[in-house]
Amino acid sequence: MVARHPSIEPYETGRLEVTDGHRLYWETVGDPDGVPVVYLHGGPGSGAGPGRRRLFDPNVFRAVLFDQRGCGRSVPRADTPAVDLSTNTTAHLVADIERLREHLGVERWVVVGVSWGVTLGLAYAQAHPDRVIAMALGAITSDSRREVEWITRDMRRIFPREWERFVEPVAEDERDGNLAAAYARLLADPDPSVREHAAVRWCEWEDAHVSLTPGWTPDARYRDPTFRMVFARLVTHYWGNDCFLAPNQLRDGMHLLADIPAVLVHGRYDVSGPLDIAWELTRLWPGSRLVVVDDAGHGGGSFTEHLVAAIDSFAHLGAGAGT
């Protein structure tokens, strides 16, 4: 099995001015003449931390990593209600990816996405299939209403004690409705203590529903109050609005990806995103191959090694394919 690649520093960084006052932090690592690849982080709101650089062989790939609107090193950061989220939607993010591609002079690239990054990657590829060489996707999601309901409500059957703690901040008359939207309202409350309590409880639940992974430990990022608030605001904003996708939009558009090769990597113990999501997707995508990682959940185990191997499998495409 392929291990992570060595730690590496960017050879170029910048902030790209897009629309609506947003400036996106981006960086490129590896070989400037290598196979272009773009990394789409999870969340929404997780950011593309330095560790993600190690997914890419620096002798083969020209890897582009960036922080999506409102998070990480991009500005403005969505850590207070004063930051308007109305111009932070899936369509805006898809347009941002295209603007970044044009800014960097990339003709076509490999798209790599993890978790929410899978959903965003599928939306981008369906909008711009001619710009995608191949796709390597891990922890498969399509963020349908069914999936959001599974994570926010149906998993109480697995984690009943944790779910009761999760819904405690939500008014009783809202608990049968859209829980992500109810949390989004709490996270926009004028009272900072209400916002902070909601962010803590949301992130506790995020930690709970990935805890079946063998060897799981709590996510240290949630101890950072700024990360916690940004992450909770953006996830609930997207999930509360069905990720700004029409019902079945991604599944109905899979024919657009018929000529794009892909490797899908998914953990056997991923209760947050059950394996049937990846299975159904690959059945709609003749050019895809599904890798089930038996010792992983929503990450963990040998998940990263399998994702690295999936990315490396496209090294043979050659740098000329992307310029």
Image (cartoon, rainbow, N blue to C red):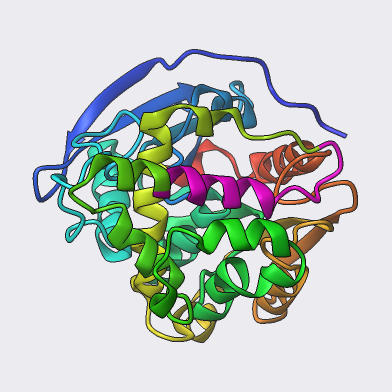
- What residue do we see at 41% from left, 50% from top? 198
- What residue do we see at 41% from left, 26% from top? 28
Image location (x, y in percent) of residue 103: 23, 39
Compared to residue 152, the image places residue 269 above or below, namely above
Image location (x, y in percent) of residue 308: 71, 37
Question: Residue 204 lies in magenta, yes or no?
Answer: yes
Q: Is residue 233 left or right of residue 253?
A: left
- What residue do we see at 78% from left, 36% from top? 305
Picture quarter with the N terminus: top right
Question: Residue 84 lies in magenta, yes or no?
Answer: no
Q: Which residues are magenta?
A: 198-215
Image location (x, y in percent) of residue 73: 31, 28
| Magenta region, main secondary structure | helix
Q: Is residue 252 left or right of residue 155?
A: left
Q: Is residue 259 left or right of residue 131?
A: right
Compared to residue 252, the image places residue 118 above or below, namely above
Please identify the residue farthest to the left as the structure is shown: 21
Question: Exactly how many numbered labels are in the figure?
Answer: 0
